[in-house]
């Protein structure tokens, strides 16, 4: 019924508590190291100058760090890649600041915080820092943000026949919003998707189905717990499979509305 | 395949421009046109395409004094007065917010709700993707929750609604309202958001991952944007005057719009008057978070890509709905781009004097206005502008004109240097 897109995954990046980069994440996935409870150190993407890193919102640092790591592994120049930045909530700390100031003294709103509050702030900083003039998209899709972001990036790569950067990330909630949204740990994952080739980390096949998500092999308990604490951590099964190097297939729900028929994004990777 | 999808740019297009050094070396390949099988829009100038067309024709705008913000801020706004009275149906009541009331009002214009339901019956709920754009989604409701925190500094029980307090709230609401179950995402690239939905939809249809796409965008007035743009000193005290020599900033507005995109029938036969999406171009300025590239390099790249995907030359464009916010910088850069790339016969205008700048909804609203222009042979001028900035070429006109319009472009540029250009045509133009 649905078309199948064939792509390659050329690069991967990760930032999460206990997984400060892809190399250490692989050790965790392969069981060489337990997932430590250490909080994620504030990411420091090399694309930003030191003073920009000090001022940049956490969501920007997280997104740029995983994007940069994925591009480096793919040996692709950031400036050449159309990019898709997916986040369920945007920068929750800036939203908290914005709403708190507006409730108290709206004329005191900081113009910098205001322009940093746009959902495409990480995409904007990325294109400015890398000199990238290609298409840049920022999106959200609730609990299915990772799946729909992957679909958007894969569709772009397949339709245009070019490598595409995809980053999925969310930072921990702050202030009163923390009671309302399910996100209390930072998590970011970056990928470079490209037209199929023999190079790259893995081959990727992607399709859309009108069915419920099939049961997949459960992750180790610590990783399973992390998955429930950040919508971008939906990437974990894919990252786990990429680390193990064994062919795998899995489903991601394309929406979370229980009153509607289900649909799923199906991914298969092989090496 | 990689090479086959790209084609070398035509050299003469570039040597005519002093800015060719900024350009990409390659242009994208032509795409198959898509049928726009339904569309609607609602804004301060009118609810539904008929009312908006009448407002354009009779030059009656929708900007009024700001009595909306929680503290007084002297400016004009494009406010939709009836939103306070709208009650969502019971099945949608948990989504209640100003943005979703406007989404509901918008879905109920031009028979769009019925069209979407008929589409679902014909194509199947899972084969229809939903791609929407917004810049602030329901943050107005989050602002309200912060103003009404309980004694412990927490959201009141009736505000603990995760389906409202997130950027994708719009997507969740419309998906539920239309009963669609395919891919569903909300693009939020500030003021280009609901222009880019057309580009995403085009790719979903081209790759066969969907058989139809409902696109749209909704943004509503809220303190965040009024005081936010005010903090950047971009809000005019008077009604915005796009491309006026004495323009003094933008007027904020609110709008909702939706469209249905489908592949052309295999026979290729469509009615002469059918409306088509023929091209789209997306780009980044790589320059500044809240100021445009001074030479319009990103905007020009989006234009080049849209023309290339449409397979048309600039001189085939009859009307351009410009971004034209009436900010000093945007209008200067955009007017210069139009002046250097289009012949005098191409008409161009910004309709924000009628509607205000509707931010994340501007893309879909102005796409709808471009379709209205093609349908009715009406090229809107500039409603509020008195003295054109000398930087404007002959393309940008104050007066409306009746003309045979066959191809129209719509520009949308957002914070972060995020640009999108859309190309629409009447079927008999191709």
Image: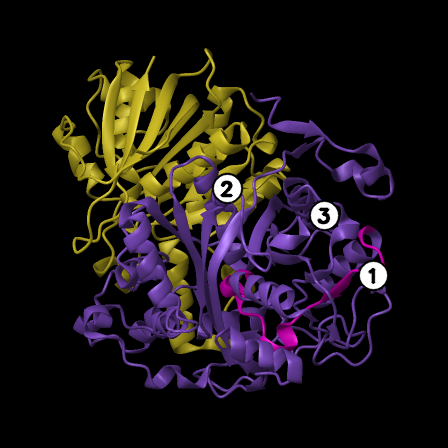
CA–CA distance between discs 2 and 3? 35 Å
At x 87%, y 43%, the residue is: B16
In this picture, which residue range is highlighted in magenta?
A: B341-363
Give the total number of marks visible in the rendering. Answer: 3
Callout 3 secondary element: helix
In the image, residue B80 above or below residue B32: below
Q: Is residue B358 magenta?
A: yes
| Residue position marked by numbered label 1 in the rendering | B345
Q: Colour of chain B?
A: purple
Q: Are marks 2 and 1 in contact (CB under 8 Å)?
A: no
Q: Are marks 2 and 3 in contact (CB under 8 Å)?
A: no
User: Where is residue B47 drawn, in percent x and y?
Assistant: 47, 78
Sequence-wise first label, 2 or 1: 2
Instruction: Pick the residue in front: B9 or A88.
Output: B9
Local crowd size for mark 3, using a 10 Å CA cut-off: few (<14), some (14–19), many (≥20): many
Q: For the residues carrying marks 3 and 1, which lies nearer the camera in this image?
A: 1
At x 21%, y 60%, the residue is: A179
CA–CA distance between discs 2 and 1? 34 Å
Q: Colour of chain A?
A: yellow
Image-quadrant location for residue A155: top left
Which mark, by number, is residue B267?
A: 2
Sequence-wise first label, 2 or 3: 2
User: Where is residue B413 drawn, in percent x and y?
Assistant: 61, 56
């Amino acid at each position: 019924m649905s078309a199948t897109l064939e792509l390659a995954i050329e690069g991967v990046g990760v930032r999460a508590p206990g997984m400060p980069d892809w190399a250490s994440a692989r050790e965790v996935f392969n069981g060489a190291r337990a997932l430590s409870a250490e909080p994620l150190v504030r990411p420091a993407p090399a694309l930003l100058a030191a003073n920009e890193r000090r001022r940049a919102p956490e969501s920007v640092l997280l997104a740029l760090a995983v994007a940069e790591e994925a591009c480096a592994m793919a040996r692709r120049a950031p400036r050449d890649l159309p990019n898709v930045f997916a986040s369920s909530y945007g920068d929750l700390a800036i939203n908290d600041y914005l709403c708190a100031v507006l409730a108290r003294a709206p004329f005191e709103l900081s113009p910098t915080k205001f322009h940093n509050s746009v959902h495409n702030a990480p995409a904007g900083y990325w294109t400015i820092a890398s000199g990238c003039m290609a298409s840049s998209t920022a999106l959200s899709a609730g609990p299915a943000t990772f799946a729909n972001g992957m679909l958007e990036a894969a569709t772009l790569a397949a339709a245009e026949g070019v490598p595409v950067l995809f980053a999925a990330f969310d930072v921990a909630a702050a202030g009163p919003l923390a009671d309302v949204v399910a996100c209390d740990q930072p998590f970011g994952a970056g990928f470079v998707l490209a037209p199929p080739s023999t190079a790259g980390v893995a081959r990727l096949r992607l399709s859309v189905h009108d069915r419920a998500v099939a049961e997949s092999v459960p992750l180790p308990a610590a990783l399973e717990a992390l998955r429930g604490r950040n919508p971008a951590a939906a990437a974990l099964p894919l990252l786990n499979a990429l680390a193990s190097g064994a062919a795998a297939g899995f489903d991601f729900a394309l929406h979370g509305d229980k009153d509607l028929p289900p649909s799923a994004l199906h991914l298969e990777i092989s090496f | 395949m990689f090479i086959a999808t790209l084609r070398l740019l035509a050299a003469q297009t570039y040597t005519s421009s002093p800015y060719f050094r900024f350009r990409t070396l390659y242009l994208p390949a032509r795409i198959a046109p898509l049928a726009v099988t339904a569309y609607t829009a609602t804004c301060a100038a009118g609810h539904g395409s008929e009312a908006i067309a009448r407002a354009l024709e009779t030059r009656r705008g929708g900007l009024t004094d700001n009595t909306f913000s929680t503290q007084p801020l002297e400016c004009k706004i494009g406010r939709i007065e009836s939103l306070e009275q709208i009650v969502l149906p019971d099945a949608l009541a948990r989504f209640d917010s100003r943005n979703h009331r406007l989404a509901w009002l918008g879905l109920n214009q031009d028979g769009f709700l019925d069209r979407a339901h008929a589409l679902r019956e014909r194509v199947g709920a899972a084969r229809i993707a939903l791609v929407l754009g917004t810049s602030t989604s329901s943050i107005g409701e989050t602002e309200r929750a912060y103003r009404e925190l309980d004694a412990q500094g927490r959201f009141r029980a009736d505000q603990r609604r995760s389906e409202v307090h997130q950027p994708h709230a719009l997507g969740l609401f419309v998906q539920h309202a239309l009963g669609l179950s395919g891919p569903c995402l909300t693009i939020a690239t500030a003021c280009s958001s609901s222009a880019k939905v057309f580009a995403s939809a085009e790719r979903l249809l081209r790759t066969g991952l969907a058989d139809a796409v409902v696109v749209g965008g909704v943004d509503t007035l809220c303190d965040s944007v009024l005081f936010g743009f005010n903090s950047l000193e971009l809000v005019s005290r008077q009604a915005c005057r796009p491309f006026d020599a004495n323009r003094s900033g933008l007027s904020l507005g609110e709008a909702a719009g939706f469209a249905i995109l489908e592949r052309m029938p295999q026979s290729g036969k469509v009615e002469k008057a059918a409306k088509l999406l023929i091209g789209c171009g997306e780009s980044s300025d790589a320059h500044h978070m809240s100021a445009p590239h001074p030479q319009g390099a990103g905007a020009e790249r989006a234009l080049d890509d849209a023309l290339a995907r449409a397979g048309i030359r600039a001189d085939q464009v009859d009307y351009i709905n410009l971004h034209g916010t009436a900010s000093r910088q945007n209008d200067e850069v955009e007017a210069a781009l139009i002046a250097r790339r289009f012949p005098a016969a191409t008409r161009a205008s910004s309709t924000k004097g009628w509607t205000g700048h509707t931010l994340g909804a501007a893309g879909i609203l102005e796409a709808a206005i471009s379709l209205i222009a093609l349908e009715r042979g009406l090229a809107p001028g500039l409603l509020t502008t008195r003295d054109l900035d000398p930087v404007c070429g002959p393309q940008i006109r104050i007066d409306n004109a009746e003309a045979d319009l066959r191809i129209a472009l719509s520009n949308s540029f957002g914070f972060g240097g995020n640009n999108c250009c859309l190309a629409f045509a009447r079927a008999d133009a191709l």
